[in-house]
Amino acid sequence: MIMFQIVVAIYLAALASQASRFVEYEFESVNVTSRIDPATVVAGCRYILTPLIARHQQVGSTCCDIAGQ
């Protein structure tokens, strides 16, 4: 029974980790040329950090920059 609970906990942690990506990133489609056939345009995807995450990406760089002292 304990092994089942461990497996369920691991799966739930993995699911939560992947689901959090939708909160951290905004995905948008872009058109790029194909690597195989440069005359062909294919759809690609790129991600941008959401404003909430981007604002805190460089924690400490403005208030506690040790290298700049």
Image (spheres, grey):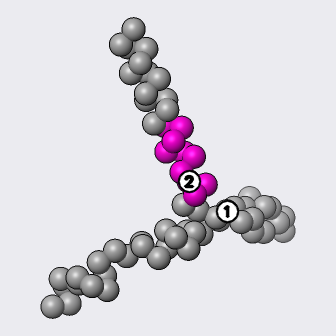
Q: Which residues are magenta?
A: 14-23
The quarter of the picture where the N terminus appears is top left
Furthest-bottom residue in view? 69
Q: CA distance from mark 2 to mark 1?
A: 10 Å
In the image, residue 37 above or below residue 15: below
Q: In the rendered structure, does residue 9 fall within the stretch colored magenta?
A: no
In the image, residue 38 above or below residue 66: above
Left or right of 26, for residue 8:
left
Q: Are there few (<14), some (14-19), or many (20+) residues within 10 Å of tag 2?
A: few
Q: Are there few (<14), some (14-19), or many (20+) residues within 10 Å of tag 1?
A: some
Q: Name the residue beneath numbered marker 1.
A: 27
Contact between marks 2 and 1 (CB within 8 A): the answer is no
Name the residue: 57% across, 69% down: 50
Q: Is residue 44 visible in the rendered structure shown here? A: yes
User: In the image, which disc is placed on residue 36?
Assistant: none
Tell me residue 67's x, y (percent): 19, 84
Tell me residue 4's x, y (percent): 43, 14
Q: Name the residue beneath numbered marker 2.
A: 21
